[in-house]
Image (spheres, coloured by chain):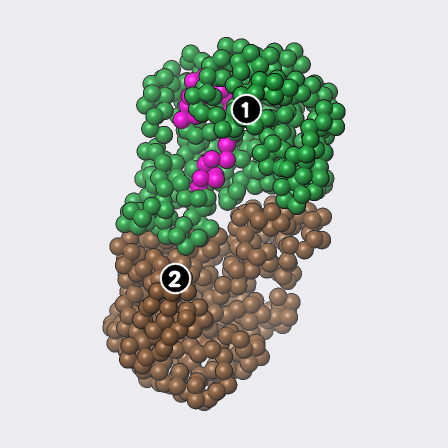
Chain colours: A brown, B green
């Protein structure tokens, strides 16, 4: 495969919504893009070939989980994460910052040493410095590398957020240095600042000074409302560099995505479609369907007649209801594919509508419904 | 689809081993055949399309489980079991006899009323008569229907086995009557008799008198050794009708299958490939591989380089070991496909070798190894 330098182009704009294209050494990513989450080197409950067949052009995996199990060296020895999980398309790896806050038993954030935490699996102690996170992501050989940030829990404590911004900026600098120069990969900075506009701007400006291939917005979708999130995006949309991809981390529902695209976001990741799929919740163009609901026992129609991929329109709600009632894996497998497929259909329609200049209309039609 | 009458032909013999072909309204089944088990209207952990792609030409499902959940009427209302589970190929349904013995809390066998038992799911009381079992299987609309038998636990108590044979014969008669005449489906009798040759012969002769489309051997693989099982088969092989399919129920390991084909068996079913797959045990032409074994953490080779189907040769033992260590569904999904695929490769090789007159040689090469 010929190495291609990482590159991003905005092809079309409709107000703030952007149609774009990211070029990587492993293929292009049409934006706005949704990245299915493959936390532990697998998109839960699905074959990666099928994930790609839904139209996914990039998946996300997690440094935090992979450093604990199976360990970065084991993946390096296997030829990197792509070969390990048999994934041809680009992979973005998160730095670990978010999971250290949300999953681990965090002992201490040490400005110099990094985050000191105990694994949520067996309590084993780990220290993750900004440099170490980049080193691990290099071993994984991911295409888009994220800087280690301090992602605080939702709080309105200004000083806590200010400190997190300052630390994250310092760590972003160290991450950039460790990353070095590699035009075949990308390093993204992560904007922190909670719900404070001035801290968001401070964070963004300092990151721009360091210079990154893309800018992610972190510390949202950690308990804040959609309204609060959109307020931050509304503020940031006029300040963010226009020539770099903008990635809203960990978001979200179809409605979150529509509203964020409207506010200029290019990239998303979220466990929602896969996690919801495993628990019986299906996303469709007619809204959400909880297939465990007893009324579906008599419903021999599929979730969506028009979805022919993976024979999805051959499985009735009655059948899927039975699979969930009997704890059969196939239920999770079907809904996982259904949901990833729906999300990619949504992204496809979003891109098509921006291209046609009809996104505002599309947004109005579906933002409330989905 | 044009209705085809159920039909069986022996195409070639090598000593007692038989190459044959079953014709059904839903397609042909080359024998010796292995039927993957789809207990609850799903072959656990796999898409039915993939099960078929391994070369499976028929699957088995269970009256006992389906009558409890979701209930036969719900499947009938969905258009039958094939439509319910989106299965194009023939389905054989077991009658419930074996599961009533092995799974349920059995209250009583009543000669007239049938088996009275409590569901293993919620304790609900059920009565299953021979007629009721056939009625349910008609609602499921399976292609091969089994008579309800009394399948006793392994015992050397002659009288217990004698009683089970007598009851099973009586129930087989009632089943035949209830089944009626339907040339598009098949009804199989089930030979009981434990490890007693004279009781096996008595059971067989009485079933032949009633007249069935195929003859199954039940009550083996319930705790007996392979040697004991082969002794029964060695005895029966000269007595069983030559113009009807012979089905050894619930068997077995690759070695069991090879030894049983040598003794004239045409059809098999077993949960082993799927159940073993879900717990980390892979079947390969080089024998069994327990992928949970720590030594595979450093093994970046696939289970079998030559198996290209489903990308199976793209997953390293290292990766599959990681998936099982982290309880990722994909591990079970990969090994389930690997194992069903291996079983179907085994059946294919068995048929090819009988055709070529080399089955004895093939048997000697692999019976000990697999």
Label 1, on which residue? Answer: B155
Reply yes or no: does residue B257 show up in magenta. Answer: yes
| Vertical side of A103 occupied by A110: above or below | below
Per the model, the C-alpha gap separating discs 1 and 2 is 46 Å
What residue lies at 47% left-to-right and 82% top-to-bottom?
A194
| Quarter-of-image position of residue A108 | bottom left
Q: Which residues are magenta?
A: B255-277
Residue B208 x %, y %: 62, 13
Point 43% across, 32% down: residue: B343
**Main structural element of the magenta stretch: helix, strand or loop?**
helix
Report x, y in % for residue A30: 44, 64
Q: Farthest residue in the right direction? A: B112
Please give the label number shown on residue B2. none
Q: Mark yes or no: residue A130 visible.
A: no
Residue B270 x/y as whole percent: 50, 32
* Residue B61 drawn at (x, y percent): 59, 35
Residue A350 shows in the view: yes
**Badge 1 and badge 2 both on one subunit:** no
Label 2: which residue?
A122
Give me the residue at 27% from left, 50% from top: B298
Which of B244 and A180 lies nearest the eye of the viewer? B244
């Amino acid at each position: 495969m010929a190495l291609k330098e990482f590159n991003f182009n905005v092809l079309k704009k409709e107000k703030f919504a952007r149609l774009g294209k990211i070029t990587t050494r492993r293929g292009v990513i049409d934006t706005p893009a949704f990245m299915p989450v493959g936390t532990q080197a697998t998109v839960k409950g699905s074959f990666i070939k099928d994930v790609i067949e839904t139209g996914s052009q990039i998946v996300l995996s997690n440094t935090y989980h992979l450093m604990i199990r199976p360990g970065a060296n084991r993946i390096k020895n296997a030829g990197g994460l792509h070969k390990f999980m048999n994934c041809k398309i680009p992979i973005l790896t998160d730095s670990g910052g978010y999971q250290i806050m949300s999953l681990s038993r965090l002992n201490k954030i040490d400005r110099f040493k990094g985050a000191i935490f105990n694994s949520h699996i067996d309590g084993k102690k780990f220290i993750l410095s900004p440099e170490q996170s980049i080193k691990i992501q290099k071993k994984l050989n991911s295409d888009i590398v994220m800087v280690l940030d301090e992602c605080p829990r939702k709080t309105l404590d200004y000083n806590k957020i200010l400190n997190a911004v300052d630390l994250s900026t310092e760590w972003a600098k160290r991450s950039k240095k460790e990353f070095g120069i590699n035009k075949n990969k990308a390093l993204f900075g992560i904007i922190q600042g909670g719900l404070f506009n001035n801290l968001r701007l401070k964070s963004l400006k300092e990151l721009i000074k360091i210079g990154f291939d893309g800018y992610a917005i972190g510390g949202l979708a950690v308990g804040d409302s959609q309204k609060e999130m959109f307020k931050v995006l509304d503020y940031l949309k006029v300040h963010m560099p226009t020539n770099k991809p903008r990635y809203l981390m960990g978001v979200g529902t179809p409605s979150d995505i529509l509203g964020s695209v409207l506010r200029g976001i290019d990239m998303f990741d979220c466990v929602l479609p896969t996690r919801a799929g495993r628990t019986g919740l299906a996303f469709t163009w007619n809204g959400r369907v909880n297939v465990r609901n007893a009324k579906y026992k008599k419903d021999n129609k599929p979730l969506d007649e028009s979805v022919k991929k993976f024979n999805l329109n051959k499985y009735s709600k009655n059948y899927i209801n039975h699979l969930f009632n009997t704890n059969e894996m196939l239920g999770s497998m079907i809904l996982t594919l259904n949901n990833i497929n729906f999300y990619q259909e949504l992204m496809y329609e979003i891109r098509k509508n921006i291209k046609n200049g009809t996104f505002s209309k599309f947004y109005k039609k579906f933002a409330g419904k989905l």
